[in-house]
Image (spheres, rainbow, N blue to C red):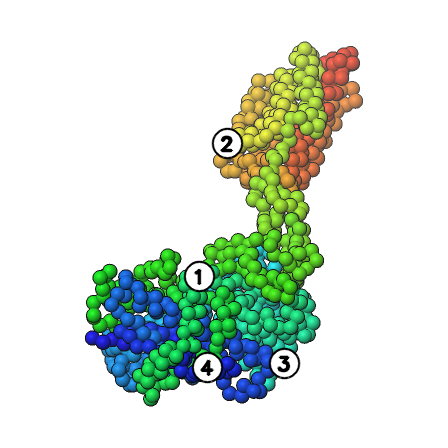
C-alpha cells in the first residue's frame, strides 16, 4: 500500500535578496514525495510587503531570520537523505518531505496545519467519531520553532494524535501531556533554563535583580517561572516588565523607554532578559541611547547567539553579557552537504529536476515555493552554519524515523509494507530511547529532552564578539569564575538592595521588599544560622550563645560548689557553730548536776545542743552539686533538727508558765513537764514532727530543678519547692512550738536575786521568728545559686541565735562566774513554789 507520510517544514519566507538566479532551482526542493513524507517547521521572516520602506537594521534582521530558517530546512533535508541512504533504519522505505511557510503568523500557520490534517490523497478533513483508522496527509509534524505557534498547532495535531516534534519551542506550558499528548520537543523546557539562571544568581550572590521579557508566550512563560523560583530562593525582584514584540506599534518606543527608566530607578546591576532577538535588540539599543549604564545582562539562547543583538552600535558598552545556551553537538557532514547543494544549484541539471518536481505538484493546494531561496548564495549562509544549532532538527527527524522503524517492525533485511497510523508512533516515542550519531536520546515524562546548557560570555576582541564558554549546567551548576571578565573595576559586580550582613547578624526587612533590610545583631542565646537568615535561631535549652554569635555553646552547671569563696566562708562559719555547740554541750555535761544546768533543763539541754550540732552540720547538704536525694533531705533535716531543739525547750517553757501564770494548777500538772515525764513530752513532739515529715514526702517533697532561664550562660541546679502546702506543713509545727514557748515565757518576772531562765527562751524564739520572716520572703522569690546560700544562712542564724540567747550566757557563768552557780541563784521555780504556798 502506498502511504504518504509527511514531516512538515514551515519556511517563513518574507524577505528579498538581490542576486538573481533561477526561481525554480532551490525553492522547488521544499516538497518531495516518498513512501513516508517527512517535513519540518522553520522560521524565516515575515511580511514581504513594503521592503523599500524598511530601515537597514530591519532588513538585517529579516536576512538573519531567513538564514536561520533556511539552515534548519537544509538540516531537515540532510537528515532525511541520511535516513533514505541508510541500510538499517528504514531499509526499503523512502521518506519524503513537505515544507510550508508560516510567516510567524498564527493565521498563516493554520493553513498548512489544516492541509496536513486532510485525509491522505484528498483535500478534505474527515469528521469521525473514531480516528483510529484515519490516515492524514502526514504521519508526523516537525516544528514550528516558536512556542506561540506550537501552542496553537499542538491542539490541532493532538486532537488527531499526530506526533509533532518541535526543535525550538521551550514554553513550560507545552509540558502538559494531558493537553498536548502528541507534542514533543528536542530542546529543554524553560523550567530547566530558569533553574540554571537562579543557580547562577545565587552563585554570585545577586539577590536584587530586574527581569524583562518579551510580550509573547516564550517571554511571559519564562518570566513567570523565574518569578516563582526567585521567591523561593531569596532573590528579590526590583522590577518586572514586558517589552513589545511588534516594534512597529505606536506605543512600542514609549514602552521601551519607560522600561529603561524604571530599571534605572531601582539601582539594580543585574538584568535577566527573556526575549527573542528582535525585542532584545530594541531593549539593548534603548538602554545605550538613554544612558542606563553598564549592567550584567543574563539571557538565553533566544537572543544571545543572534547577530541581531550584537549589531547594535556600541553594544560593547552595555556591560557584561552572560547566558545559557543549549548544549548541542555537531552534525557530521552537514556543512559539506550544504556546500555541495549550493554548487548543484548553479547547474542546469539540478534546475531541470526542480522543474519536474514542481510540475508534479497540485496547483490547487497551498503554494510552498520559497521565492527568496533563488537569491541565496553559499556565502550568505556559510558564516551562520557554525552558530545556528542544527542538532535539534536532526534529532527531531530521527526521533520520528526510529518510532517508524519500531512501528513497522523493521529488521536489517527490510521493512514490511504495512500500514502505520500516526497514533501508533506515540507509544514508541514515549518509552524507547534512540541513538543519533552515537549519542543516546530519550523523551522524558513531559515529552522533552534535556541535554543541559553551556554558560557563555560575550567576549569582545577587536570589535568582534566571541561566545566564550565559562561554565556548564546539567542538574548542577559549574562556573569558571576566573574566566569571566566583568565590567566593574574590581571585577566583582554586586546587586543587592543593601550590603550583606556580617556573621552573627540577621536581616530585618525594611518596607515591603524582602531584599531591603537592616543588619541587626543576634541577641544573647540566639545564633546566626545562614547567610540569608531573616531571624536568629534560638539555641537549644542546654546551650547558650553571646550576642552576635554564629554558634551555641554548652552551658556549664551552676551550683554552690565546695571551692567557691562564699562556700568556704559559710563552711567556716558552720564549723565554728558546730564547735560552739560541741563546746557548750561538753561544758554542760561537765556541770550536769550543777544548779545552773539543772535549771536550764539538765539532760534535755544536752539533747537540745546535740540537735543544734546536727542542724549546723546539715548546712553541708546545701553545698556541692544537688541531687534528687539531697533535695529530699535538706528540708527534712532542718525541720527535724530544729524540732528536736524546740521540743527539748518546751517542757521548761510549760513549767515556767504553770508556776507563774497558773499557780493553783501547778502542783497537779507539773509532774507532766518535769523530771522523767518531761522526756515523754519531748518524744511526743519529735514523733509528731516525724509524722509531718512523712506527710511532706507524700504531698510534695523538694525536687531537683535545672533552671535554664535565670542565668544566661549556665544551667542553675537548685532544689525547687514542689508544694508550698507541704512546705508549710513541715515547718509550721516548729513555728507553733516556738510560738508556744514564746507565749509561755515573755511575760515572766523573776526576783532580782534569782536567774531569769525564761528570758533565754523568749529571745531564742523571738530571733527565730525574725529570721524566718526574712527567710520566707527571700526564699520564695529567689531562683539563683543564692537560694542555697539563703538556706545555709537561715540555718546558721537560727542555730547561733538559740545558742547566743539561751546557752552562751549560761556557759559564761559556768566558766567565768562559777560563784553564781548556787542553788539560791539558780533555784528551780517548781521547787520554790511549794514553799511559798505553805507560807
Residue wearing tag 4:
21
Q: Residue at x 24, y 68 (%)?
A: 92
Q: State the CA–CA distance, disc 3 to disc 1.
A: 42 Å
Q: Which residue is mark 3?
A: 254
Q: Residue 235: image x %, image y %?
A: 58, 61
Residue 59, placed above or below residue 787: below
State how far apart marks 3 and 2 are (Cα).
92 Å
The residue that label 1 is drawn on is 330
Q: Secondary structure at mark 2?
A: helix
Could you say where residue 419 lies in the image, as x and y percent from the top left?
Answer: 22, 72
Distance of label 4 from label 3 (alpha carbons):
43 Å
Q: Identify the residue at image location x=53%, y=67%.
A: 305
Q: Residues within 10 Å of mark 2 (few under 14, many from 20)?
A: few
Other residues around mark 4 within 10 Å, as few (<14) / some (14–19) / many (≥20): some
Residue 303 placement: quadrant: bottom right
The answer for how far apart the CA atoms under marks 2 and 4 are is: 119 Å
Residue 38 in percent (x, y) is at 33, 73
User: Which of the marked residues, 4 or 3, is nearer the chain's N terminus?
Assistant: 4
Amino acid at each position: 500500500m502506498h502511504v504518504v507520510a509527511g514531516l512538515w517544514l514551515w519556511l517563513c519566507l518574507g524577505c528579498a535578496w538581490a542576486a538573481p538566479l533561477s526561481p525554480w532551482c532551490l525553492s522547488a526542493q521544499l516538497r518531495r514525495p516518498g513512501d513516508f513524507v517527512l517535513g519540518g517547521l522553520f522560521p524565516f521572516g515575515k511580511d514581504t510587503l513594503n521592503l523599500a520602506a524598511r530601515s537597514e537594521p530591519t532588513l538585517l534582521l529579516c536576512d538573519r531570520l531567513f538564514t536561520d530558517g533556511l539552515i534548519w530546512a537544509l538540516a531537515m533535508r540532510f537528515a532525511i537523505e541520511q535516513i533514505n541512504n541508510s541500510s538499517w533504519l528504514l531499509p526499503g522505505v523512502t521518506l519524503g518531505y513537505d515544507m510550508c511557510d508560516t510567516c510567524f503568523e498564527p493565521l498563516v500557520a493554520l493553513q498548512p496545519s489544516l492541509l496536513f490534517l486532510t485525509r491522505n490523497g484528498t483535500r478534505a478533513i474527515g469528521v469521525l467519531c473514531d480516528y483510529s483508522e484515519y490516515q492524514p496527509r502526514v504521519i508526523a509534524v516537525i516544528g514550528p520553532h516558536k512556542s506561540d505557534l506550537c501552542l496553537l498547532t499542538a491542539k490541532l495535531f493532538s486532537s488527531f494524535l499526530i506526533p509533532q516534534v518541535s526543535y525550538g519551542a521551550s514554553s513550560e506550558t507545552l509540558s502538559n501531556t494531558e493537553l498536548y499528548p502528541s507534542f514533543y520537543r528536542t530542546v529543554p523546557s524553560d523550567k530547566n533554563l530558569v533553574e540554571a539562571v537562579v543557580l547562577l544568581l545565587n552563585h554570585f550572590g545577586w539577590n536584587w535583580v530586574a527581569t524583562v521579557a518579551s510580550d509573547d508566550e516564550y517571554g511571559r512563560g519564562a518570566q513567570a517561572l523565574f518569578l516563582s523560583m526567585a521567591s523561593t530562593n531569596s532573590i528579590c525582584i526590583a522590577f518586572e516588565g514586558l517589552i513589545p514584540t511588534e516594534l512597529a506599534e505606536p506605543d512600542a518606543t514609549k514602552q521601551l523607554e519607560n522600561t529603561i527608566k524604571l530599571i534605572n530607578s531601582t539601582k539594580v546591576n543585574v538584568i535577566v532578559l527573556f526575549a527573542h532577538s528582535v525585542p532584545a535588540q530594541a531593549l539593548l539599543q534603548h538602554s545605550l541611547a538613554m544612558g542606563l549604564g553598564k549592567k550584567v545582562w543574563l539571557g538565553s539562547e533566544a537572543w544571545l547567539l543572534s547577530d541581531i543583538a550584537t549589531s547594535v552600535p556600541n553594544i560593547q558598552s552595555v556591560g557584561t553579557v552572560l547566558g545559557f545556551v543549549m548544549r548541542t553537538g555537531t552534525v557530521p557532514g552537514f556543512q559539506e552537504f550544504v556546500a555541495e547543494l549550493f554548487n548543484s544549484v548553479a547547474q542546469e541539471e539540478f534546475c531541470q529536476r526542480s522543474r519536474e518536481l514542481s510540475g508534479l505538484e497540485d496547483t490547487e493546494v497551498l503554494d510552498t515555493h520559497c521565492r527568496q531561496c533563488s537569491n541565496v548564495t553559499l556565502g550568505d549562509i556559510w558564516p551562520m552554519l557554525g552558530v545556528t544549532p542544527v542538532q535539534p532538527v536532526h534529532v527531531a527527524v530521527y526521533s520520528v524515523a526510529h518510532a517508524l522503524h519500531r512501528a513497522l517492525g523493521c529488521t536489517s533485511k527490510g521493512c514490511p509494507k504495512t500500514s502505520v497510523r500516526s497514533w501508533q508512533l506515540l507509544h514508541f516515542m514515549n518509552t524507547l530511547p534512540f541513538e543519533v550519531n552515537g549519542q543516546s536520546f530519550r523523551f522524558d515524562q513531559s515529552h522533552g529532552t534535556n541535554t543541559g546548557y553551556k554558560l557563555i560570555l560575550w567576549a569582545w576582541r577587536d570589535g568582534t564578539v566571541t561566545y566564550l564558554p565559562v561554565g556548564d549546567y546539567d542538574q548542577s551548576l559549574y562556573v569558571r569564575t576566573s574566566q569571566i571578565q566583568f565590567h566593574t573595576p574590581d571585577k566583582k559586580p554586586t546587586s543587592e538592595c543593601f550590603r550583606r550582613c556580617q556573621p552573627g547578624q540577621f536581616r530585618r526587612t525594611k518596607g515591603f521588599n524582602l531584599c531591603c533590610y537592616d543588619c541587626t545583631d543576634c541577641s544573647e542565646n540566639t545564633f546566626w544560622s545562614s547567610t540569608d537568615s531573616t531571624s536568629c535561631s534560638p539555641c537549644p535549652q542546654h546551650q547558650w550563645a553571646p550576642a552576635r554569635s554564629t554558634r551555641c555553646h554548652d552551658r556549664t552547671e551552676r551550683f554552690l560548689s565546695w571551692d567557691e569563696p562564699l562556700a568556704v566562708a559559710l563552711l567556716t562559719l558552720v564549723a565554728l557553730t558546730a564547735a560552739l555547740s560541741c563546746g557548750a554541750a561538753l561544758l554542760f555535761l561537765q556541770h550536769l548536776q550543777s544548779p545552773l544546768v539543772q535549771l536550764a533543763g539538765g539532760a534535755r539541754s544536752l539533747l537540745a545542743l546535740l540537735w543544734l550540732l546536727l542542724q549546723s552540720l546539715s548546712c553541708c547538704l546545701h553545698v556541692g552539686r544537688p541531687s534528687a536525694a539531697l533535695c529530699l533531705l535538706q528540708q527534712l533535716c532542718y525541720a527535724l533538727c530544729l524540732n528536736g531543739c524546740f521540743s527539748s525547750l518546751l517542757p521548761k517553757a510549760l513549767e515556767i508558765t504553770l508556776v507563774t501564770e497558773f499557780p493553783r494548777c501547778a502542783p497537779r500538772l507539773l509532774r507532766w513537764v518535769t523530771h522523767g515525764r518531761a522526756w515523754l513530752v519531748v518524744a511526743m513532739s519529735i514523733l509528731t514532727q516525724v509524722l509531718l515529715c512523712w506527710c511532706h514526702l507524700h504531698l510534695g517533697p523538694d525536687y531537683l530543678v535545672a533552671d535554664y532561664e535565670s542565668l544566661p550562660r549556665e544551667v542553675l541546679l537548685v532544689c525547687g519547692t514542689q508544694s508550698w502546702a507541704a512546705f508549710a506543713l513541715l515547718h509550721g509545727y516548729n513555728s507553733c512550738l516556738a510560738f508556744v514557748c514564746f507565749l509561755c515565757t515573755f511575760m515572766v518576772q523573776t526576783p532580782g536575786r534569782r536567774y531569769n531562765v525564761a528570758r533565754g527562751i523568749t529571745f531564742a524564739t523571738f530571733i527565730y521568728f525574725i529570721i524566718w520572716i526574712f527567710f520566707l520572703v527571700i526564699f520564695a522569690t529567689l531562683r539563683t545559686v543564692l537560694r542555697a546560700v539563703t538556706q545555709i544562712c537561715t540555718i546558721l542564724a537560727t542555730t547561733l541565735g538559740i545558742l547566743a540567747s539561751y546557752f552562751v550566757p549560761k556557759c559564761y557563768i559556768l566558766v567565768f562566774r562559777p560563784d553564781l552557780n548556787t542553788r539560791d541563784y539558780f533555784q528551780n521555780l517548781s521547787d520554790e513554789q511549794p514553799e511559798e504556798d505553805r507560807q
